[in-house]
Image (spheres, helix red, strand yellow):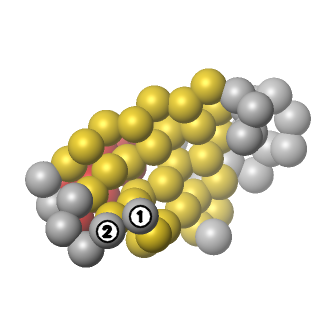
Amino acid sequence: MRVDSHWWNGDVRLARRDVYVRTDGEAWEVEAQMGGPEGKSKVQQCPGRASAMILADAWRGPRWQWRKL
């Protein structure tokens, strides 16, 4: 799968959050990662890009200043 979109909350400590939207051209998934690569993550399959972007928006929430990478 390739990364279609990636956001980061700007924190480099334990409060780091990343949200990824990935696709292989047919399947779509969203991953929310907490605590950097060594932390916890949750992956949700989505039927298409639109639903993946809606879920990514919901998982980001308004709490941090998100940066698109």
Residue in the foreground of this view, choosing between 38 and 69? 38
Q: How far across and down, in percent of the image, does residue 10 sit?
A: 76, 52
Q: Which residue is mark 1?
A: 1
Looking at the rendered image, the quarter that the N terminus falls into is: bottom left
Circle 2 packing at 10 Å, graded few (<14), some (14-19), many (20+), is: few
SS of the residue at dot 1? Answer: loop
* Mark toward the start of the polypeptide (1 vs 2): 1
* Amino acid beneath label 1: Met
Q: Residues within 10 Å of mark 1 (few under 14, many from 20)?
A: few
Gap in Å between the C-alphas at discs 1 and 2?
A: 5 Å
Quadrant in the rendering for residue 15: top right
Please give the name of the residue rendered at 64% of the width and 31% of the height, measured from the top-left corner.
34
Q: Which amino acid is tagged 2?
A: Asp
Q: Quadrant of residue 21?
A: bottom left
Most foreground residue, 8 or 63: 8
Closer to us: 2 or 54? 2
Q: Is residue 52 visible?
A: yes
Q: Is residue 35 above or below residue 6?
A: above
Is there any visible trace of residue 54 in the rendered image?
no
Say whether residue 42 is left or right of residue 57.
right
Q: Residue at x 50, y 39 (%)?
A: 32
Considering every residue shown, the one lying at the far right of the view is: 13
Question: Is the residue under label 2 in contact with that under label 1 (CB below 8 Å)?
Answer: yes
Q: Identify the residue shown where x is 65% and y is 54%.
A: 8
Q: Position of residue 12 (x, y in %)?
A: 85, 44
SS for tag 2? loop
Q: Which residue is mark 2?
A: 24
Give the label on residue 26, or none.
none
Apparent side of residue 57 relative to residue 41 in the rendered image (left or right): left
| Residue at (80% x, 44% y) in the render | 11
